[in-house]
Image (cartoon, helix red, strand yellow):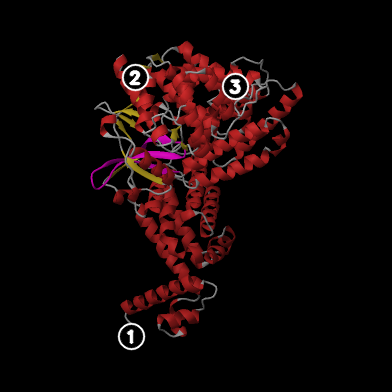
């Protein structure tokens, strides 16, 4: 019997929901793929048709959140500064990632850390590329056409640093993450604008 | 322009003769210039606003303050203390939340200047107003995380631009879906806890100073500031103060305290009724008549007495921006972030103080001063200065007639006496003393600004008697 796309999506959704519930109640580490399959009412083997690992489930959810966040900020006010728009983008991601906050740290470690970038893992790489493209697009809107690879690396380090901080943030409603994000982006955008100004000057003088 | 230590240290005068006012000589001009700048938003400007003006003013005041304390110490001790303070400044520089803390220190130290009355008033005011700002995206996120939804959805309208800066956050105009015009005060994320941590570090850093004889006084001042910051960081407490204060006033008082909307308020967000009127400076710019000025002054003094006698709390922040003259002549009192409750023993002392305040009796004044400040019989000079200062402070009341608060020479006398007290370290007493001093100076500054000529004795009589205290306990 052929399985329709709708059915496939429904099963995928069931797996994801069962996994989230188990992560919440038992913790990420203590939850096995077998537990997830059982809770979703499918065979463990079937689960592997959808996700290789439990990390991949988190990855899938995170990926969705990243995409949604990008769409959420495309209709921003025109008078926002670069810093403000970047803040809105990351803040939108954090809102959407919030249900995953407590068990997302392993994903950050394996997929998002600046060290992982070199390994070019599938999930981390697409997150990285997609997010940085959005950042570059926002920068272009603010007249910064070509961001140097160094700037990109600086941004990525700050960004992943903020995410890592957030995943372990114990302050009320993670308000310290907002402060850290604000100050990181403040620093980054000032640095970016300054270095753009310098290279413009160089171009003019040469 | 970025914040750096060398700016701070450079702001410290290196070689000063006692009694000169070099530090503040150029201040009014600097302040004047700063008034034309918009509230700085974005990038390093937010940090640089601190790095230059406030930090320098604060550094200058700190230095001045310090010199006063070490007036009688020998040169070595003074140098040592100065080194400690330089280090303390470096420490301040490294603090993540310098913005709030420095401004607060600036405000507190602004209680101890050696400058002309006009500059004194303006300095207090400027130190209060020039706070850095949060951008809209951050603000929106704070509202979402505190109130559970975006400002666009919670409110019928929400102004993205702040209309006032508060030291720990900023204030925005908004309209509730039920139609009320409100002011929403929003705190910078985590600043309360961060400032607390900064203070802990500062105290640790200052431990080497603990053996000096002025350590207790320094500690008192800093603890007062720390306490004040903790109170101001808690908007729920401010909401409670507002509710308590609001209940003390009636329609015929002509005094309004804004209503709080608790469903849109948390410890980090405070939504209040918005009063539209003129700040005292704007009011004065319209050249109001003496009687119009007196009317506003009477309402402010009445509010102060009402809060004190009926509410048993002292309003500390006498800042011209905290009083609004409404179109119908009523006066709005804003900002209840720092109220000092008067309880227990202090309330009993307040009651005792009422008598010399009312009668002008010097013997009774001296008795209560000795009790309040714990002055011994052999501390003759301390007692003299404290008495002269209290006589100046209280004269406007016990004289029982119209008093000219706009007399510059008269105001100057008070500032000089207070400066003398600080220099001679006579300002120690109880932990609340610096705040109460700020309150007393504050209301006199406001009266001076308004050039008021009013009878405060009559007002005090009404307010005391309205509490049911008929003074029959005066034997």
Q: Residue at x 55, y 28 (%)?
A: B109
Element marked by disc 3: helix
Along the line of sight, the residue nearer the viewer: B63 or B162:
B63
Left-right relation of A194 to B149: right
Whole-percent x and y of residue B409?
Answer: 48, 11
Residue B471 lies in quadrant: top left
Element marked by disc 2: helix
The quadrant of the picture occupied by the N terminus of chain A is bottom left
Report crowding for label 3: few under 14, some 14 to 19, many 20 or more residues within 10 A (C-alpha). many
Alpha carbon separation for disc pair 2 and 1 = 83 Å
Whether residue B242 appears in this view of the structure is yes
**What is the magenta segment's predominant secondary structure?**
strand
Q: Which mark is residue B415?
A: none
> Does the CB distance between marks 3 and 1 fall below 8 Å?
no
Along the line of sight, the residue nearer the viewer: B391 or A69:
B391
* Residue mark closest to the camera, 2 vs 3: 3
> Does the CB distance between marks 2 and 3 fall below 8 Å?
no
Alpha carbon separation for disc pair 2 and 3 = 32 Å
**Outermost residue to the right:** B76
Residue ID for mark 2: B284
Element marked by disc 1: loop
Whole-percent x and y of residue B17?
Answer: 66, 15
Residue ID for mark 1: A2
- Asked whether the residues under marks 2 and 3 belong to the same chain, the reply is yes
Q: Which mark is residue B421?
A: 3
Name the chain under label 2.
B
Q: What range is drawn magenta here?
A: B161-187
- Chain-order first, disc 2 or disc 3: 2
Name the chain under label 1.
A
Q: Residue at x 66, y 22 (%)?
A: B379
């Amino acid at each position: 019997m052929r399985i329709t796309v709708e059915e496939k999506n429904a099963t995928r959704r069931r797996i994801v929901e069962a996994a989230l519930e188990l992560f919440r109640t038992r913790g990420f580490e203590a939850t096995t793929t077998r537990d997830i399959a059982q809770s979703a009412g499918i065979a463990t083997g079937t689960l592997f048709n959808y996700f290789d690992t439990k990390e991949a489930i988190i990855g899938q959810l995170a990926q969705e959140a990243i995409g949604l966040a990008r769409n959420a900020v495309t209709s921003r006010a025109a008078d926002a500064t670069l810093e403000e728009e970047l803040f809105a983008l990351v803040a939108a991601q954090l809102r959407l990632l919030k249900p995953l906050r407590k068990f997302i740290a392993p994903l950050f470690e394996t997929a998002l850390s600046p060290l992982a970038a070199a390994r070019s893992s599938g999930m981390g790489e697409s997150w990285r590329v997609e997010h940085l493209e959005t950042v570059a697009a926002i920068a272009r809107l603010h007249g910064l056409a070509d961001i140097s690879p160094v700037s990109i690396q600086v941004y990525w380090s700050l960004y992943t640093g903020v995410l890592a901080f957030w995943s372990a943030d114990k302050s009320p409603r993670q308000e310290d993450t907002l402060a850290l994000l604000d100050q990181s982006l403040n620093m980054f955008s000032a640095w970016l604008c300054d270095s753009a100004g310098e290279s413009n000057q160089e171009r003019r003088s040469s | 322009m970025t914040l750096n230590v060398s700016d701070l240290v450079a702001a410290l005068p290196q070689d000063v003769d006692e009694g000169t006012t070099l530090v503040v000589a150029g201040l009014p001009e600097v302040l004047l210039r700063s008034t034309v700048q918009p509230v700085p938003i974005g990038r390093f400007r937010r940090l640089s606003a601190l790095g230059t003006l406030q930090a320098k003013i604060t550094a200058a005041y700190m230095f001045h303050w310090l010199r006063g304390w070490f007036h009688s110490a020998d040169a070595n001790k003074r140098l040592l203390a100065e080194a400690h303070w330089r280090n303390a400044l470096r420490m301040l520089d490294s603090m993540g939340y310098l913005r709030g803390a420095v401004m607060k220190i600036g405000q507190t130290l602004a209680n101890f200047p050696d400058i002309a009355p006009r500059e004194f008033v303006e300095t207090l005011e400027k130190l209060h107003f020039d706070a850095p700002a949060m951008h809209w995206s951050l603000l929106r996120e704070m509202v979402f995380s505190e109130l559970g939804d975006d400002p666009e959805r919670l409110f019928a309208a929400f102004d993205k631009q702040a209309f006032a800066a508060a030291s720990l956050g900023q204030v925005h105009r908004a309209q509730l879906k039920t139609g009320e015009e409100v002011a929403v005060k929003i705190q910078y994320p985590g600043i309360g806890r961060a400032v607390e941590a900064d203070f802990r570090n500062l105290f640790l850093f200052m431990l080497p100073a603990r053996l000096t004889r002025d350590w207790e006084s320094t500690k008192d001042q800093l603890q007062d500031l720390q306490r004040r910051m903790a109170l101001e960081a808690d908007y729920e407490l401010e909401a409670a103060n507002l509710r308590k204060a609001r209940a003390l006033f009636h329609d015929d008082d002509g005094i309004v305290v804004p209503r709080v909307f608790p469903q849109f308020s948390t410890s980090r967000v405070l939504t209040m009724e918005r009063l539209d009127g003129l700040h005292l400076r704007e009011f004065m710019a319209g050249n109001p008549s003496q009687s119009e000025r007196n009317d506003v002054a009477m309402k402010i003094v009445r509010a102060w007495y009402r809060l004190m006698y009926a509410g048993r709390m002292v309003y500390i922040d006498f800042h011209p921006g905290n009083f609004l003259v409404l179109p119908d002549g009523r006066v709005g009192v804003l900002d209840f972030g720092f109220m000092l409750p008067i309880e227990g023993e202090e309330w009993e002392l307040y009651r005792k103080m009422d008598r010399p305040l009312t009668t002008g009796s010097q013997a009774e004044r001296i008795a209560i001063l000795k009790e309040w400040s714990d002055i011994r019989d052999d501390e003759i000079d301390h007692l003299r200065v404290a008495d002269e200062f209290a006589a100046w402070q209280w004269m406007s009341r016990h004289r029982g007639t119209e008093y000219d608060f706009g007399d510059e020479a008269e105001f100057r006398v008070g500032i000089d006496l207070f400066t003398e007290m600080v220099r001679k370290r006579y300002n120690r007493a109880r932990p609340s003393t610096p705040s109460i001093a700020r309150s007393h100076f504050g209301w006199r500054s406001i009266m001076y600004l308004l050039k008021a000529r009013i009878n405060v004795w009559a007002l005090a009589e009404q307010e005391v008697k309205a509490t049911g205290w008929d003074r029959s306990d005066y034997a």
